[in-house]
Image (cartoon, rainbow, N blue to C red):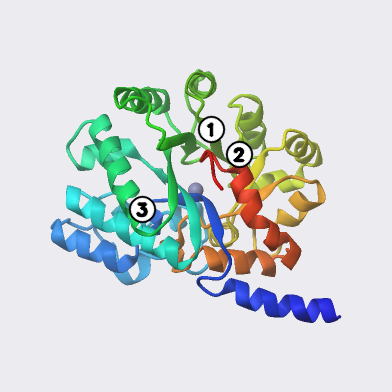
């Protein structure tokens, strides 16, 4: 009992902003921009909002949504910014400030460079360079190590998009700032048959990590495909795997880390209200996992809140104390001390 009492106190200390050192392995740059900054940028860029978009209701997601489409409604606006170079600097600084407030010591930021190139009317290589410079400066200012993950969106053009991103990466001399590739987007949408081998080739050729959003919408086969075809090192969400013992054993045997985003999983409905979060299954089967925040500003929360949510979902204080070391172990950023 004494241990339990002590644990609760420690938990309380741990969940306030600040608290213990943290590593963030799954956060989308645009999903981490404070809403006040989004409003300022939209006004500055004179962006016309989509018809019927209601700032008060549609820009944040704080209660469980009925569908993933409903959860993704803020992106109707998020995908419209930043058009100006200085607003990329502005939003990046705000994102890193939010991470610093949550005591994040290192972060892997995901971004859709091709969207950025379109918005900023520049080439993918120029967009990637801007992203490297601006995130590097903002991270340095806050004493945070950062790496960039290049996100490819599922769909017909995913192979072409990946080729464009890799060309930009090579044009810039394969910068160390880029650490991995990510596949994201609607899991129901098909992608070209050659996409998995293109990911594997990039991994072999450039030494980039591979993380795949999979199993968030109940498609357990996408998790298996991520492992067996994409040679994924990590899985984003992976919630569907919790119901497949064979797959859990495979993830454990291959030491594939699940990026668990507890607040997001409840808001998207990836984990229904009536069910326990599969992180307990991950723990039972020895599947490594790291707690992440996904889109903290959209949730009006931060990584510290996700750590608190993980405790509420059944993790122990002991589990939480291992989180920083686990994040370091499974991070694609090299040489973390
Ligand atoms: Zn995500």
Disc number placed over residue 182 in the picture, else none: none
Is residue 267 depicted above or below 259 in this figure?
Answer: below
Give the Cα separation between the discs numbered 1 and 3: 23 Å
Q: Is residue 93 left or right of residue 331?
A: left
Q: Position of residue 112 (x, y in %)?
A: 36, 40
Give the Cα separation between the discs numbered 2 and 3: 26 Å
Q: Quadrant of residue 90?
A: bottom left
Instruction: List the residue tagged with mark 2.
Output: 234
Of the image marks 1 and 2, the number of the one nearer the N terminus: 1
Q: Nearer the viewer, mark 1 or mark 3?
A: 3
Q: Is mark 2 within 8 Å of ligand 1?
A: no
**Residue positioned most to the right:** 1
Is residue 273 depicted above or below 175 in this figure?
Answer: below
Of the image marks 1 and 3, the number of the one nearer the N terminus: 3
Could you classify mark 1 by the number of other residues whose Cα lies within 10 Å: few (under 14), some (14-19), or many (20 or more)? many
Q: Is residue 217 left or right of residue 313?
A: left
Which type of secondary structure does the marked residue at label 3 adopt? Answer: helix
Give the Cα separation between the discs numbered 1 and 2: 8 Å
Instruction: List the residue tagged with mark 1.
Output: 209
Q: Quadrant of the N terminus?
A: bottom right
Q: Quadrant of residue 15?
A: bottom right
Instruction: List the residue tagged with mark 3.
Output: 140
Q: Nearer the viewer, mark 1 or mark 2?
A: 1
Q: Position of residue 311 (x, y in %)?
A: 68, 67
């Amino acid at each position: 009992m004494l241990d339990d009492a002590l644990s609760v106190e420690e938990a309380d200390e741990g969940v306030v902003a600040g608290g213990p050192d943290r590593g963030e392995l799954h956060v989308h740059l645009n999903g981490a921009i404070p809403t006040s900054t989004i409003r300022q940028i939209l006004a500055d860029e004179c962006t016309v909002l989509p018809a019927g978009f209601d700032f008060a209701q549609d820009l944040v997601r704080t209660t469980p949504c009925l569908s993933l489409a409903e959860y993704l409604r803020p992106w109707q606006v998020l995908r419209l910014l930043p058009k100006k170079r200085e607003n990329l600097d502005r939003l990046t600084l705000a994102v890193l400030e939010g991470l610093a407030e949550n005591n994040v010591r290192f972060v892997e930021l995901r971004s859709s460079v091709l969207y950025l190139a379109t918005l900023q009317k520049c080439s993918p290589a120029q967009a990637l360079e801007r992203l490297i410079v601006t995130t590097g400066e903002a991270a340095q200012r806050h004493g945070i190590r950062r790496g960039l993950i290049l996100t490819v969106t599922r769909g017909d053009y995913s192979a072409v998009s990946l080729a464009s991103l890799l060309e930009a990466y090579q044009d810039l001399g394969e910068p160390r700032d880029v650490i991995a590739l990510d596949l994201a987007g609607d899991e129901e949408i098909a992608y070209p048959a050659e996409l998995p081998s293109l990911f594997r080739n990039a991994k072999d050729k450039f030494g980039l990590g591979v993380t795949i959003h999979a199993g968030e919408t109940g498609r357990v086969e996408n998790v298996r495909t991520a492992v067996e075809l994409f040679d994924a090192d990590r899985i984003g969400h992976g919630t569907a795997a919790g119901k497949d013992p064979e797959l859990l054993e495979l993830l454990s045997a291959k030491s594939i880390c699940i990026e668990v985003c507890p607040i997001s999983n409840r808001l998207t409905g990836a984990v229904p209200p009536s069910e326990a979060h599969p992180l307990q299954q991950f723990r039972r089967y020895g599947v490594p996992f790291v707690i992440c925040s996904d889109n903290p500003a959209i949730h009006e929360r931060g990584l510290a809140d996700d750590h608190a949510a993980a405790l509420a979902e059944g993790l122990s204080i002991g589990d939480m104390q291992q989180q920083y070391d686990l994040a370091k172990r499974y991070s694609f950023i090299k040489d973390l001390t």
